[in-house]
Image (tube, rainbow, N blue to C red):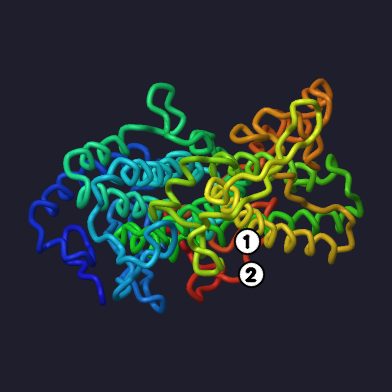
Amino acid sequence: MAIDYQERIPNNVDLAENRTLQRALEHWQPHFLDWWRELGPSDFLDADIYLRTATSVDAKGWASYGTVKMPDYRWGIFLADAIPDRRIGFGDEYGKPVWQQVPGEHRSTLRRLIVTQGDTEPASVEQQRLLGHSCPSLYDLRNLFQVNVEEGRHLWAMVYLLHAYFGRDGREEAEELLARHSGDRNKPRILGTFNEPISDWLSFFMFTYFTDRDGKFQLKSLAESSFDPLSRSCNFMLTEEAHHMFVGETGIGRVIRRTLEVMKELGTEDPAAIRAKGAIDLPTMQRYLNFWFSSSLDLFGAENSSNAASYFATGIKGRPDEANYPDHICRDGSFHLEMPDGKGGVAAEDVPMRNAMNEVTRTAYIRDCEIGVKRWSRLIAKAGYAQELKLPSERFRRSIGVWASQPIDPEGCLIPTAEYQAKLAGWLPSENDRSFIKSLMHRVTEPGKMAAWIAPPERGINNLPVEYEYVHLH
Ligand SMILES: [Fe+2]
Ligand SMILES: [Fe+2]
């Protein structure tokens, strides 16, 4: 079904048929636009940008491309098509019809999950709002803005659910989603990672690779939900989300390619020499990777979680790709969970399977993260170097769960606390790293040109050449 862009709020949810809801959302819309002008990408309101906009929810040809100014982007409400006679796919209610309305007993839990997901969307736009000033190319600038407008649309997706299904509380929560701000002392965003500043493009690529990928797994879990409108919202968000991770994976890949060129040219692996040439040495990239990966792991929650168990039991939130698991009830199974024994060693405990659902999801996420990391390492190996990029252990630098605050090195070994404290700074971006990276961040806006620290992409957007003027600045 094509979406009617004559409507004030483009949608495929028959908004015109529900005047009360339509009016409520039309009331929220100017607040959203004010927020976008104030806390969205700074100083690019006037630029003409080659963006994609969703025009249908068909997997094939769901988007159209054209030049728009960001404030004129048509943020809309799009749900993936309903699956006829869809049934609950897991938990105690397995096999019963899915819910088209929110069951009273699950109202506050569902609302909290939707608010938490919704909060991350505008948070990332806020975190990235200054990046446009230091873009390495117009191609990258356009990708940044594409990610930003789609995160804005993901906020719309969650706000629609709050307005349509949660009455007055939902409307209040929708306002609050615009009132909390990333990094704000008094009203921060809900989750830690979304309050970390993203002030350089290396962090942006790491964020889109690791943290947007957390988003992908959260959305996959929510796409399994028995609350069908949530499931359909998340399914369509996943379609858009793929590009965000593409930006991260190819972005990091291009930084590595450029570094390898410089290493070849200079005939050295010496970080200082590489830096002097204006490229980013691999150990610095590893430290950024360590930071963003470990920070993103915490977003999945504790390994042993009674909340996770009850989300699963009640059918509110499933495992990503639930259909691939043999047992959808998991009433009897157990999960072998390792944890520190408090004496410098590792103990293990069998916890009920349902309690371990966060860990199951985190494990699937880590496997997905590994794919790109292996690809990057292959680039390095093919160039003839022994260095590699690696995911640190999932136990390293955790703030949540059984490994929180444990003295663990990137290999996953418990080490003496004093040694850990002495070494931790060396495993993460230092002040020196950050100021070096910052020194590289100069805006490049000539079509087709790239900053010296990043290789050009292999191809442009939507079959256009890399040299295309993806953003026209006035
Ligand atoms: Fe998103
Ligand atoms: Fe995203």
Q: Residue furthest front?
A: 332
Label annotation for residue 250:
1
Q: Residues within 10 Å of mark 2 (few under 14, many from 20)?
A: few
All told, the count of numbered labels is 2
Image position, residue 91 (x, y; %): 43, 57
Q: Secondary structure at mark 2?
A: loop
Which residue is painted at 71% across and 57% down in the image?
373
Sequence-first tag of 2 and 1: 1
Which residue is painted at 42% across and 27% down in the image?
184
Image position, residue 419 (x, y; %): 84, 24
Residue 327 location, quadrant: bottom right
Residue 298 seen in the figure: yes
The answer to whether residue 159 is left or right of residue 473 is left
Q: Are marks 2 and 1 in contact (CB under 8 Å)?
A: yes
Q: Amino acid at mark 1?
A: Thr
The answer to whether residue 373 is left or right of residue 460 is right
Residue 257 seen in the figure: no
Quadrant for the N terminus, please. Answer: bottom left
Eyeballing the image, is 112 above or below 158? above
Q: Which residue is mark 2?
A: 458
Image position, residue 275 (x, y; %): 78, 42
Image position, residue 294 (x, y; %): 65, 41
